[in-house]
Amino acid sequence: MSTTQTGIDFIGAGWNYPLGTDATGGIALVTREREIEQAIRLILGTAVGERPMRPEFGCRIHDHVFNTPSSATAGQIGYDVRQALDRWEPRVDVLDVAVGFDAMESGVLYIDIRYSIRGLNDPRNLVFPFYVIPAQPENGGA
């Protein structure tokens, strides 16, 4: 089976993020599934409006940094993740997005994304930690 039949040509290759060099001193590249994983992390890690030349790029999860943890917040974060990946990562189909509040006291939400690479029967998942500002006591702790 050729790579065209498996969909590997569709995945492609890209620069490693963060940018680095390989053993030969050239720009380090990533390929296949690793390139898609890095692209997803880049999309989710970029706030909409952060890039001056591409102000629409990114994900709106950063709008929820100060929200209180609730099922409504989790639902909105899941919706924002799905919208961003549908728009900016055409190589994947998002199967599910789950938001976990397991480490909320330390200000961490875990976004578990289940996806499949289009053209391949290869379900994958990625857990993206999202950091929020924990609520402060009303009286300042006194």
Image (spheres, grey):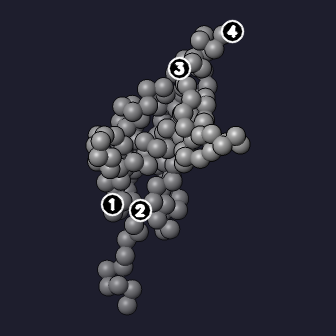
Residue at point 62%, 39% (across, down)? 26
Task: Report the residue that reaches farthest toward the front.
Answer: 25
Q: Amino acid at mark 4?
A: Met
- Dot 3 amino acid type: Phe
Q: Residue at x 32, y 85 (%)?
A: 139
Q: Quadrant of residue 117?
A: top right
Q: CA distance from mark 1 to mark 2?
A: 8 Å
Question: Is residue 139 visible in the rendered structure shown here?
Answer: yes
Q: Amino acid at mark 1?
A: Asn
Q: Are marks 3 and 4 in contact (CB under 8 Å)?
A: no
Q: Nearer the viewer, mark 4 or mark 1?
A: 4
Whichever of labels 1 and 2 marks the residue nearer the N terminus, that label is: 1
**Which class describes the residues within 10 Å of circle 1: few (<14), some (14-19), or many (20+)?**
some
The disc labelled 2 sits on which kind of residue? Val
Marks 3 and 1, how far apart at CA = 38 Å
Whether 35 is drawn above or below 118: the answer is below
Q: Residue at x 41, y 62 (%)?
A: 132
Tag 2 residue: 132
Measured along the vertical axis of the image, is residue 133 above or below residue 89? below
Left or right position of 77 against 102: left
Give the label on residue 67, or none: 1
**Which numbered mark, 2 or 4, is in the foreground of this view?**
4
Q: Secondary structure at mark 1?
A: loop
